[in-house]
Image (spheres, rainbow, N blue to C red):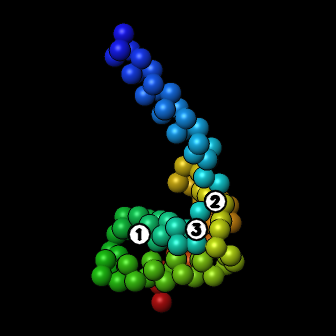
């Protein structure tokens, strides 16, 4: 009986803690969005054949910075399930294309 009441108390406590957390993270910080842009660039460019891996990170950092110039403020809509919002997606794709354009 004592074990069951302890389990019930633990479940109730956990439910209270979870209930106190925000329902969803609707926004992300400027640094977090910049990092997500960098991660996106590295993940997409790593698979490209013939890419110079030594310069890839620097180019991706530049692409992330360029994409971030299109956004003002310090709080942004959070991408859902690791996808970007339409504006974020358009910004990073254009920045990556420019950073890795053949010259």
Residue at point 59%, 38% (across, down): 19
Q: Which residue is mark 2?
A: 27
What is the distance, in whole Å, between disc 2 and disc 1 at their CAs? Answer: 23 Å
The quadrant of the image that shows the N terminus is top left
The residue carrying pointer 3 sits among few (fewer than 14), some (14 to 19) or many (20 or more) residues within 10 Å by Cα, namely some
Q: Which residue is mark 1?
A: 42
Residue at point 50%, 27% (across, down): 12
Residue contact between numbered discs 2 and 3, judged by CB atoms under 8 Å: yes
Residue contact between numbered discs 2 and 1, judged by CB atoms under 8 Å: no
Q: Residue 46: which quarter of the image? A: bottom left
Give the numbered dot on residue 51. Answer: none
Seen in the picture, residue 80 relative to 2 is either above or below; the reply is: below
Residue 67 seen in this snapshot: yes
**Percent position (x, y) of residue 56?**
37, 78
Q: Residue placed farthest to the front in the image?
A: 2
Residue at point 57%, 45% (across, down): 21
Q: Residue placed farthest to the top in the image?
A: 1
Seen in the picture, residue 53 relative to 90 is either above or below; the reply is: below
Q: Nearer the viewer, mark 2 or mark 1?
A: 2
């Amino acid at each position: 009986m004592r074990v069951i009441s302890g389990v019930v108390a633990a479940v109730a406590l956990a439910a209270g803690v979870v209930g106190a957390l925000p329902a969803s993270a609707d926004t992300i910080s400027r640094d977090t969005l910049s990092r997500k842009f960098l991660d996106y660039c590295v993940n997409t460019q790593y698979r490209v054949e013939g890419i110079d891996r030594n310069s890839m990170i620097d180019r991706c950092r530049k692409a992330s910075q360029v994409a971030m110039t299109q956004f003002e403020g310090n709080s942004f809509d959070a991408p859902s399930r690791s996808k970007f919002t339409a504006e974020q997606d358009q910004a990073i794709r254009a920045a990556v294309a420019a950073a890795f354009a053949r010259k």
